[in-house]
Image (cartoon, helix red, strand yellow):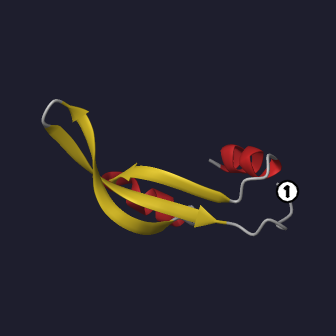
Amino acid sequence: MEEMEFAARAAGFCNFFVRANVNAVPLYRALGYRELEAGTMSVARGIALPVMFMEKQQPKERSLEK
């Protein structure tokens, strides 16, 4: 995740969004993401998994140093 976020910041992005499986929410929280809202993701006809939409915002002026 650190490498992906670094590359995204280097490309000018400062807001990151994920559609996290509910089991992964604690991981994303630990990485600095915050919960936006619960939702579902269709995976097959008539089957939907619960997910949490999450975001992480970083100031544009943040240093790109690792």
Left or right: residue 2 versus residue 22 is right
Of residue 66 and residue 58, the one placed in the foreground of this image is 58
Are there few (<14), some (14-19), or many (20+) residues within 10 Å of tag 1?
few
Q: Position of residue 56 (x, y in %)?
A: 58, 64
Residue 16 sits in quarter: bottom right
Q: Looking at the rendering, in which quadrant would you find the C terminus?
A: bottom right
Q: Position of residue 4 (x, y in %)?
A: 67, 44
Give the residue drawn at x 82%, y 48%. Answer: 10
Give the residue drawn at x 49%, y 59%. Answer: 28
Left or right: residue 61 versus residue 47 is right
Left or right: residue 51 versus residue 44 is right
Q: Amino acid at mark 1?
A: Leu
Q: Position of residue 12 (x, y in %)?
A: 79, 52
- Per the image, label 1 sits on a secondary structure element best described as loop
Q: Position of residue 48 (x, y in %)?
A: 20, 42
Left or right: residue 55 versus residue 13 is left
Give the residue drawn at x 71%, y 44%. Answer: 3
Name the residue tied to disc 1. 64
